[in-house]
Amino acid sequence: MVPDVSTGSSTLGLINYLFGEGRRDEHTDPHIVAAWDMAGAPDPGRDPGATYAKLAQRLDHHVDLRTRELGGERPPQHVWHCPVRTAPGDRCLTDAEWAEVARRVVAAAGIAPEDDEKACRWIAVRHADDHIHILATTVRADGRRPRTHRDGQRAQRECRRIEAEFGLRRLKSGDLTAPRTPTGAERAKAVRQGQAVTAREWLRERAYTVAAGVRSVDEYFTVLRSLGVQVRTRIGPETGEVTGYSLAAPGDTNGQGEPIWYGGSKLAPDLSLNRLRERLPDQETAGRPQHIAEPGGPWRRAETALREARVSVESGEDPVAQAQLDAFGDTLHSLALMTDGAQQADLHEAAKAFNRARRSVIRSDHQAATALRKAAKELAYASRAPGGLAIALLFAAVQMARAASAWHRQRGHEQQAAAAMEALHLLRAGYRQASDPVLADLARRAPRAATISRFEHDLRAALPDHAGRILADSAWVALTTALARAESAGHDVRELLSEAAAERELDTADSPAQVLIWRIVPQPNKRTEAARRRSAMTPKTALPRPTAAHEHSDPHRPAEAHDGPRHGR
């Protein structure tokens, strides 16, 4: 059961809508099921003599009376509106049951506490099987305004109790950090235009994806405009600085042909200008991230940063963990953007699902997540990952999503925990699509039996507590290929295995061999790295290439004199 509180200024306008035919003729039987005084509330849905204006006049009596007595104007936003809807699949409630729901919601929200004779006037109108609309004018009979602080949150808590008592589907409790859902009119417009999502949802996902890869708010606006999104900024009159912004989707206009604007905070709380500035503080170094020419470098750094972030989530302070989850959301958007293949759709959906899990009432210590956020931005500009680096990063993302779900669940963040779990299922599906053929290929390329036997000996020496499970794992043969390649690249096999022993997944993973494979695959080639360092140390003016005679005649000649020109630059 979902309550959705909002405020407005036109009592008559809202009554006209509630008792009218609806925007799509969906209001077939609008009628009052509950009110502050059923005898004193004329019902245009049941009494042919009752008019909309008469009902509005009765509702507004307190408001008009007090403003006339005080010689002032009506208070702003004095109309309180709260649709309450049951979940899909719930049974159809009777009018009497909806009346009880309405009375309990207005009491919980502070509109009309029980036994308060001077409470606000209100009505509850039903015009569909699955929902009612509660309308109230928020001036009490004694002239005071009701105490509606956190009214939406209190209404939600009451709805959770009603669900349990009425035997309805138990929804997750929220904490007022969820983004606004599309309205019925927005959804209907998307259907008419043949769009899969509403303009609000389309803009939200574009904004998240762009924010993951940019370094400054100015660059954020520039990239959005390059994608066809209209951007409107609000300038402070005194400072001349940007104080807010709104976005409009291409072709999304109102009846007058004007763009329909959505403020950043209306798309999602963490897309407000202030929240973006917290995440994008680097105004002076905006632009494409540097130092990403190394093949696979951004993917390795992202995988390392993600593993370190997971440790912070599992053992760090709450503000640090919350910052890492927010940065992980950016990483998922960049990963989905840079991934090819059948798994890309799953990754896009995972990033979208995790948007709900990346924020909570806990404020982020964004400085603590600098490494992961920087890695996410590098990834947005990276070339396609060589070898299995993309799968290694995807595997790390699976582990992070599992940690995120557990972290939220431990703190009672029900909606965020559910969103993280949804992202986890999608990431697992994407991982399997990407990893299954690679693991099969590694198994086909297994080294000779003697080498496998030597690796088994190394494994028992490095990981005695885990060796039995790893050797029994179906991915053990594929792991031997990864070990052989790492050894050829200059790594010590026992050292690699010992480093992996500290990873907690070995204790709980369904496939500990796969954990080791995706720890080993991202390791850089030590011999290539050494050659690159030697090349970088070579003077800018290369020495003449020595002849064979010169080489043999001067055995003490420094290696750098040979290696620089020989390898070239």
Image (spheres, helix red, strand yellow):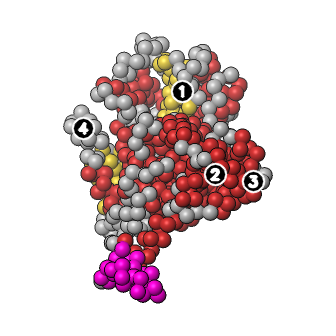
Q: Amino acid under label 2?
A: Thr
Q: Amino acid under label 4?
A: Gly
Occupied quadrant, residue 442:
top right
Contact? badges 2 and 3 (CB < 8 Å): no
Tell which circle, 3 or 4, labels the residue nearer the N-terminal end. 4
Res. 413 in view: no
Which residues lie in the magenta part?
Answer: 543-566
The answer for how far apart the CA atoms under marks 1 and 4 are is: 31 Å
Tell which circle, 1 or 2, labels the residue nearer the N-terminal end. 1
Residue highlighted by disc 3: 460
Residue highlighted by disc 4: 251
The residue at the point 40 percent across, 48 percent down is 338
Picture layout, residue 567 above or below residue 353: below
Counting from the top left corner in percent of width and height, residue 147 is at: 59, 45
Counting from the top left corner in percent of width and height, residue 269 is at: 48, 50
> Helix, strand or loop at disc 4?
loop
The residue at the point 45 percent across, 61 percent down is 297
Tell which circle, 1 or 4, labels the residue nearer the N-terminal end. 1
Which residue is at the front of the view, 166 or 489?
489
The label shown at residue 451 is: 2
The answer for how far apart the CA atoms under marks 1 and 3 are is: 59 Å
Which residue is at the front of the view, 140 or 16?
16
Which residue is at the front of the view, 242 or 88?
88
Res. 280 in view: yes
Judge left or right: residue 460 versus residue 496.
Answer: right
Tell which circle, 1 or 3, labels the residue nearer the N-terminal end. 1
